Amino acid sequence: MNIERNLIFIKGEDKTEKITYCKYNNGKYDVTFTGKPTTYSYNYSNVRWLSKPEELNP
């Protein structure tokens, strides 16, 4: 995933750089990780997908 356009947290942990595919599918997210051919399904409540995040200026 492009980390400048997407942030994906699974169970509270940033997994963006490890994900090659993520799609919402009928109440769940289908996620494929880099180097693994298997697609895993996660409950909607376990995935937080932020699109076009803005960088905060401290």
Image: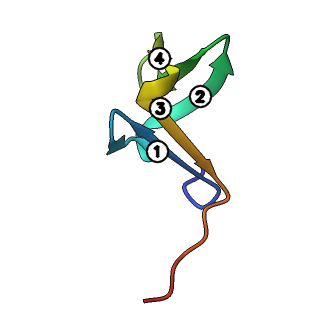
First of labels 4, 1 by sequence position: 1
Q: Residue at x 66, y 22 (%)?
A: 24
**What is the C-alpha distance between the residues marked 3 and 4?**
7 Å
Marks 2 & 1, CB-CB < 8 Å contact: no
Q: Picture coordinates of residue 20 (x, y %)?
A: 55, 33
Disc 4 target residue:
43
First of labels 3, 1 by sequence position: 1
Disc 2 target residue:
21
Q: Amino acid at mark 4?
A: Asn
First of labels 4, 2 by sequence position: 2
Left or right: where 50 falls relative to 37: right
Secondary structure of the residue carrying tag 2 is strand
33 up-or-down from 41: above or below: below
Q: Amino acid at mark 3?
A: Val
Q: Amino acid at mark 2?
A: Tyr
Label 3, residues with CA under 10 Å away: few <14, some 14-19, many ≥20:
many
**What is the C-alpha distance between the residues marked 2 and 3?**
13 Å
Marks 3 & 4, CB-CB < 8 Å contact: yes
Secondary structure of the residue carrying tag 3 is strand
Q: Picture coordinates of residue 57 (x, y %)?
A: 50, 87
Secondary structure of the residue carrying tag 4 is strand
Q: Quadrant of the C terminus?
A: bottom left
Disc 1 target residue:
16
**What is the C-alpha distance between the residues marked 4 and 2?**
16 Å
Disc 3 target residue:
47
50 up-or-down from 33: above or below: below
